[in-house]
Structure formats: structure tokens, C-alpha cells
């Protein structure tokens, strides 16, 4: 059992050390593919109007701010006239 622990620790250490080096061609290709898929997804979402929840929340906050500003301007104009 103790040998299994040592072998497992050695294997985990080997993976940890290999992750510290420069990315290999496989990892670089995977990152490029992931980046490309993110761009495709972003393009599709903007085309279809499917925004993420944070973007929708931000848009709602912006609209609420603009509505409040417009209401304040209207109130000021009503009071000034």
C-alpha cells in the first residue's frame, strides 16, 4: 500500500512539473481551437440575440439608469416651465 502511495505521488508530481513548462503543440492547438469556438459562440449569440445573464443584467441596469435620467430631466423641465 505504501508503494502505491509513493507511485501515486510520483505520478502527480510528474504531471505538476510537466504543466510548468512551455505549452506543447497539442496544448497550443487546443487553446487555438477553444478560442475559435468562443468567437463562433459570441458571433452566434450576437446574431441570435442570446446574451449571457450578466450582459442582460448590465443592459437592464443601463436602461433603468437612462429611464431615471429621462424622468429627472422631464421633472426639471416641468418645474422650470
Image (cartoon, rainbow, N blue to C red):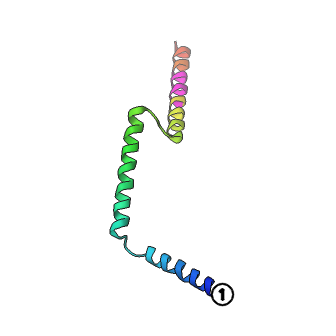
User: Quarter of the image holding residue 26?
Assistant: bottom left
Q: Which residues are magenta?
A: 65-73
Magenta stretch, main secondary structure, is helix
User: Quarter of the image holding residue 25?
Assistant: bottom left
37 in the magenta segment = no
Relative to the observer, which residue lies in front, 14 or 7?
Answer: 7
Give residue 18's position: percent from left, percent from top: 44, 77
Up-down: is 68 above or below 15?
above
User: Quarter of the image holding residue 24?
Assistant: bottom left
Which residue is rendered at x = 40% and y = 48% of the image? Answer: 38
Which residue is rendered at x = 60% and y = 85% of the image? Answer: 6
- Farthest top residue? 81
Left or right of 26 in this view: 4: right
Up-down: is 6 above or below 67?
below
Q: Within 10 angstroms of label 1, few (less than 14), some, or many (20 or more) residues?
A: few
- Farthest bottom residue? 3
66 in the magenta segment = yes
Which residue is rendered at x = 46% and y = 35% of the image? Answer: 50
Q: Secondary structure at mark 1?
A: helix
Up-down: is 29 above or below 56?
below
The quarter of the image holding the N terminus is: bottom right
Which residue is rendered at x = 51% and y = 38% of the image? Answer: 58
Residue carrying label 1: 2
Left or right of 37 in this view: 57: right
Give residue 37's position: percent from left, percent from top: 38, 49
Relative to the observer, which residue lies in front, 44 or 61?
Answer: 44
Question: In this figure, what is the number of numbered marks?
Answer: 1
Up-down: is 54 above or below 70?
below
Give residue 15's position: percent from left, percent from top: 48, 76
Give residue 39's position: percent from left, percent from top: 36, 47
Amino acid at each position: 500500500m505504501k508503494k502505491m502511495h509513493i507511485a501515486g505521488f510520483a505520478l502527480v508530481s510528474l504531471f505538476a512539473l510537466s504543466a510548468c513548462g512551455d505549452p506543447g503543440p497539442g496544448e497550443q492547438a487546443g487553446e487555438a481551437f477553444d478560442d475559435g469556438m468562443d468567437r463562433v459562440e459570441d458571433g452566434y449569440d450576437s446574431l441570435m440575440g442570446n446574451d449571457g445573464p450578466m450582459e442582460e443584467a448590465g443592459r437592464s441596469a443601463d436602461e433603468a439608469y437612462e429611464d431615471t435620467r429621462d424622468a429627472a430631466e422631464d421633472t426639471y423641465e416641468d418645474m422650470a416651465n
